[in-house]
Amino acid sequence: MPRKPRFYLPDMPAHIVQRGNYRQAVFFSDDDCAAYLRWLHEACLKHGCRLHAYVLMTNHVHLLMTPQSRESISRTIQHTGRCYVSYVNRCYGKSGTLWEGRHKGCLVPDDRYLLACMRYIELNLVPAGMVAHPADYAWSSYQSNAMGKACGMLKPLEVYLSLGASPPVRQLAYRELFRQALDPALVDDVRATVQTGTPLGNDRFREQIELTLQYRVGYPRRGRPVKTEKGY
């Protein structure tokens, strides 16, 4: 069966997930996380991606990024993954693959979904039991987006900038969003669409994407969401 084609579009944000092979750990220390982010930053600059949100979990990563071209995201993930695998193999005496095949990703269409996707990414640590609050974790974008920690690799979305006229006001407004629980139905949509590669949006948006690409992009599975490990 042929692999499903990619369908990233220039200047349209996408939610990306990359997992460890057989869901095994890919980060073993703070140094590993720092090394991954260095190569991610390098790859974003080289291949034309703007990074808006991220979290590094023990065995996978979530990214929200906007590509300059249809190939930008795939090349960025390939560059980062290749460099990081070499680093892990060298440091830990490992060999072979580290990642679970191709990364997964979906387009994120508008402001409502973008802010929800940012929150979903940065909150991923909490249901996984890694921390009680995203502010307690160093390896996500929350400390920058919500608390103002300097991070040169992050590029704010327009919807994030619209939260306030100054950085402190925006950060406060962003923190306030985390006082409200994410809509469970929206969480299910985020999980299903990134798993299937379906754009995160309504049917009209999906139809527009299909017209642009000239092929069907697929839809989430019907029925109850697929049960996954915590910290999806």
Image: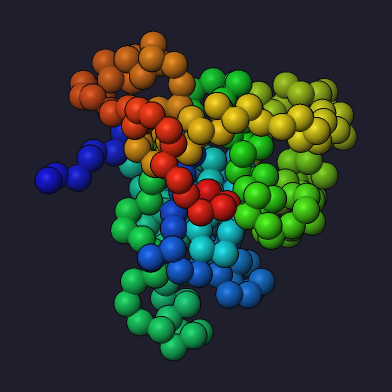
Q: Residue at x 32, y 15 (%)?
A: 207
Left or right: 119, with 74 as reference point: right
The quarter holding residue 148 reads top right
Number of labels in the image equals 0
Q: Residue furthest left?
A: 1
Left or right: 29, with 143 as reference point: left
Report the front residue among 119 and 208.
119
Q: Residue at x 55, y 27 (%)?
A: 185
Q: Residue at x 72, y 27 (%)?
A: 161
Report the front residue among 167 and 141.
141
Residue 57 seen from this side? yes
Q: Residue furthest bottom?
A: 93
In the rendered view, would you say 153 is above or below 29?
Answer: above
**Position in image of residue 197 (x %, y %):** 35, 36
Residue 72 seen from this side? no
In the rendered view, would you say 165 is above or below 28?
Answer: above
In the rendered view, would you say 122 is above or below 168?
Answer: below
Q: Residue furthest front?
A: 224
Q: Residue at x 78, y 41 (%)?
A: 146
**Position in image of residue 195 (x %, y %):** 39, 41
**Position in image of residue 33 (x %, y %):** 60, 66
